[in-house]
Structure formats: C-alpha cells, structure tokens
Amino acid sequence: MLEQIKEANDIKLIDPSEYRELAREIRRFLVRKVSRTGGHLASNLGVVELTMAMHLCCDLPEDKIVWDVGHQCYTHKILTGRQDAFDSLRQYGGMSGFPKRGESECDAMDTGHSSTSISAALGLAKARDLQGRHNKIFAVIGDGALSGGMAYEALNNAARLRSNMIIVLNDNQMSISKNVGGMSNYLGKIRTDTNYTELKQDVENALEKLPHFGNRLTERIRGVKDLIKRIFIPGMLFEDMGITYIGPIDGHDIGQMVTAFNSASKLNAAVIVHVVTQKGKGYPPAQKDPSSFHGVGPFRVSDGTLLHSKKDVPTYTNVFQNVMLETMADREDVVAISAAMPTGTGLAAVAEQYPDRFFDVGIAEEHAVTFAAGLALGGSRPVVALYSTFLQRAYDQILHDVCIGSLPVVFAVDRAGLVGSDGETHQGIFDIAFLSQMPNLTVMAPKNSQELEDMFSFAFAQEGPVAIRYSRGAAYDGLSDHREAIRVGRSEWIHTGRDIAVIAVGSMVEVAVHAVEMLQQKGLDPTLINARFVKPMDEQMLKQVAAQHSIVVTMEDGVITGGFGQAVAAWYAATERGEKCPKIVNIALPDAFIEHGTVQQLRSKYGQDAESV
C-alpha cells in the first residue's frame, strides 16, 4: 500500500479496512530504513497511527501540523510523498530528520527544540482567523515537552485568544529518558486510574441532569459540580486553564482519533486531545529499550545490535561522568543538574549513586539555571550539564541570575561545536559567541581528556561561574605530555616555531596538531598554542605572539561572528598598531546555520579540517 502514496492526501485513497496493514507496512519501512542510516526510531514507531489519523483529517498543505521538536515526523514525511528520500535520511546533502519547509510545503515549521509547538500553532491559528480562513491547525507535543514552561505560556495565551487549534498531547511517558515531575505524575494518574475513564461520561451526564434552583443554591450546586469534576473527570488542569480536554484516547486506534479530531475542529477554542502511545511499538528491541532507540546508529534488524559498535575509547561525556563521580565522592556540597537528559550528558550514573544530589528538572533549561543559582546561594556547588544547543535557551538566566551575582555555578557544555546529523537545530556553534559576552563568566575548552579533568578541578576552586565546553564523541588522547597547571586566563604553548602562530580552541587543537605537521613537511614551522581560555583571553601570550610572528591564525569550532578569533583581532586592533600588529587569519564557521552531515564532511566543507587549514 505504501506504493500508492505518492503525495499528500493519498492516504485518503486507502480503504479504512486496510489502515492496520498500512501501519504495519510503515513500521517495517521505518525499521528497515533507519537500520541503515540511523535516526530517531522509537518515537517514530510510536506515532504511526497518530500521524495517519491527522492526515486523514487534514487537507495538506492548507491545513498545518506543527511538530514539537520534530524528530517524530518520519511517518508524516512518508505520507507526504518523501519515502524515496529515506535512503538519504540525515545524510550529507540528503533528507533532514526534522521538518523542513524548504523540503516540503507540507512542513509547517522548521523545528528541533522542545515545547515550542503550541506557541507556533497558536500564531498560525490567529493569522488564519485574521485572514478569514478556516483551515485546521494541529500542534503535536509530547508529555515530556510539557515539562517546559513555554508550553504553559502558550496554553495560557491560547485560552485567552480562543482560536480553534488542536493540541495533540502524545503521551508515551518518555522524552529521551524517563519523564519526571508533577505533569508526568498527573498524566500518569489520568492514564492509569480506571475511575477516570469509566466514570467520566456517567458523571458528566448526571451533572447535566441536575435541576436548576435559585441563584444562591445554583452557585452552591455549581461549586459541588466543579468539585466532582475535579475528582472524577480527567484533564481538569487543562479545563481550569480554559482549554477543552478530550481523552485519554488510544493513540493506536485510528478511528477513535479521527472522531476526536473532527469533533475538536468544530469548537471555537483550543482543544487538547490526549492520546496514549507506546514508544517503539512494533519493533521488540525498541519497545524493550526505547531510550537506546530514541536516537540510534545503523543496526541489525534481527536483534537491534548496533553495526558500528563504538570503539573502546572514552568520550568527553564519559570523562565528565567520571569527574563528577569522583568529585561528589570527595565533596558533599557538589550537586548535579540535568534537563531531561541524564544519560546523554553522562549523569545517569551520578543519579544512581547520588540520588539526593542529582536533580532532573525536565525539559526546563531556564529553570535549571536559576535553580542552580539558588543552590549556589544556599551553599551548594551546582554543576549544570546541558548540550550547547539547549544552553542557549537559558541565555537570560545565565546572564541575569548567575553572572550578575558571580555565583559559583559550573556549566558542563556538552556537544559543543559541530555535532553532525541532527543539523541546524542541534549544532553547538553559538556558545562561544554568546557566553563570551557575559561579565564574570570564565569560558574554557579542553584540548584532550586530561585537560577536561583538570579544568573541572580548576572550576570547583573558583568563586564565580565557569563554563567548560567540549565536543561530542571520542576524547582526544594526544599531547598527554603537555599538562601544565591551569592558571586563570593563561594559555599553553605546545610548540614554539617562527613566523606563523596558530592559536586553537578546544577540539580544534587536535586539528591544528595535524595541520602543523603537514606544514612542517612543507618547510614551515608554525608555533602552536592551546588557548585553554576563551575568556579571559591570555593578553600576555598575544603580546608575545605579536613580537615573534607576522601571522596569527585562530581556530575555533564556533561561528566567526562574536567568536574567539574576532576577539583576538579586536584586541590587536586596539593595542597593537602599525608594524607591531600581525596579520590575523580567523578559521571559524560562517555566520550561518550549518546543515546535517558527518562532522568530518562538515569540517571539510567549511574549512575546518587539517587539509583545509
């Protein structure tokens, strides 16, 4: 049946008796394709019927579906005629693993981060109303994303604006790791308490039949009604906000969902349709371990075994995990904070060993940072572990709540630099630029695994905030004989040469080592310096470099605008003039969003590999 789907709305040509078989075909297709390319599997297997139901109710591209995060949009791509592109899923030059308007007019918005869909869908709905149109607007948001405060800001506004939109709450009890927090508990109660589902309709019917009396008695009866509703009817939290609630509904029953969506589309208000799905459905390895199959590399279909098992080389995340375990064993004041990603950031073992000093705040980066500020004010030494791309969501909290007070918060900035196949929304290329602007904040980047350990030891000894940025993947183990003690704002000279000085930041030191070796084979002998500190810069080193070299090359894995290289150039422009000022060459990423591809492919394209340097 998949062969019959060439473009949007072709699913409506399928006989309803064949929907179940179509869902099975889609799951087999997804498992087969993702097993070759890698990608987000478990979440996509869980929303097959949900996506089919929305498409049956929609007229795309006139109607709009906004996917929260967007990693669960694979079935949507299949049903909009892109199944032939799946061999290139997340590959360089191929199809994105996220919605992309440039890829299809059926993709309503480019997404990649959490808790944004309701806001965007509400904007689309209000624009529709202002233009006198009547198309349907869907927002698909997971229960994990409801731990993000932006979702509630949007719900609050949606209740006031009363524009019709359908908010599909995809409740699979997971984000990447297991969901946490009050909303997770609340939805779990709705999902599992049989009183809710069995008595909901009976209670509503009985309340409607109560007679009307005088005003005073009517008010009392209304109060009793509200109390009974809160006891027996699910979704009252949403109803109290002014959002109509429908559910919970079996997220694998297409007929139930189509009925609910069609009913919701007729109301003059925002409606939450709560569907319960199973992450990984239809593929036993993913059902058994949905966290491991959230984002997965190529694997063997028969048993789910990864084909390219990782070499036994520690990653920077592994090194960070070990540092935290050792430090928390020695210091009871050190605490760890994650925003719904304890496994990805290396804190899962910390959570297991020190549960009282580990805090998973959910998908709530802003709260995580200000929570850390409060912990620091109370005498703790908090470590906030976030991916670079998600740290930018807490810009104001870092600046206002941590840096103004110069509070001793350590930021473990994982996935800094190019991260590869997730593309524009996940590259960690902006942190150098936005963190460098913040007074009182020390920003560091290690050249290898040993230096990462030393930088955290240094950070715990400081009285103010420190951010340590490190890349995804295997930790560089070279230059192990270069392990000078870390001093504030001081760089490390790896090799002293002549004429050309190369100053590299973090992961670019490894690239610089290979580039310098290649230049030496050509008869040149550049100086190589490990910057160590993005901020404060080593001004003494810069003066010494200017006195001994005519060309200074900076290397960083962030955007050039506002980056380390521009800061070096600005310093020379302000302090060294005329013949004393060396020529500055900045090697950095362009002022642009970087597409998906392997890190090596992207480095080659953007002049960040040794050959290009």
Image: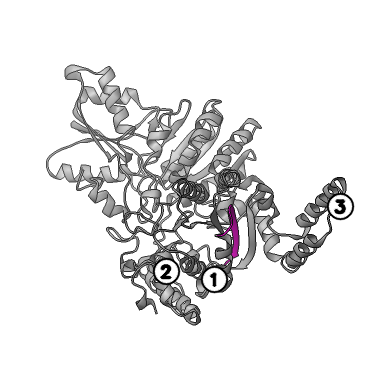
Q: Nearer the viewer, mark 3 or mark 2?
A: 3
**Contact (Cβ within 8 Å) of mark 3 with mark 2:** no
Residue in the image at 67% along x and 64% along y: 191
Q: Nearer the viewer, residue 57 or 341?
A: 57
Task: Give the numbered dot on residue 464.
Answer: none
Instruction: Say few, some or many: other residues with alpha carbon within 10 Å of mark 3 (under 14 / 14 to 19 / 20 or more).
Output: few
Q: Which mark is residue 306?
A: 2
Amino acid beneath label 1:
Gln
Which amino acid lies under the numbered mark 2 shown in the image of this protein?
Leu
In magenta, the rendered stretch is 266-278
Residue at the image position 44 percent from the left and 47 percent from the top:
131
Q: Amino acid at mark 3?
A: Phe
185 within the magenta span:
no
Name the outermost residue toward the left.
Answer: 523
Name the residue carrying label 3. 213
Going by the image, does 55 lie left or right of 526? right
**Numbered circles on residues, count:** 3
Residue bearing the label numbered 1: 287
Residue 530 found in image quarter: top left
Along the line of sight, the residue nearer the viewer: 574 or 29:
29
Quadrant housing the N terminus: bottom left
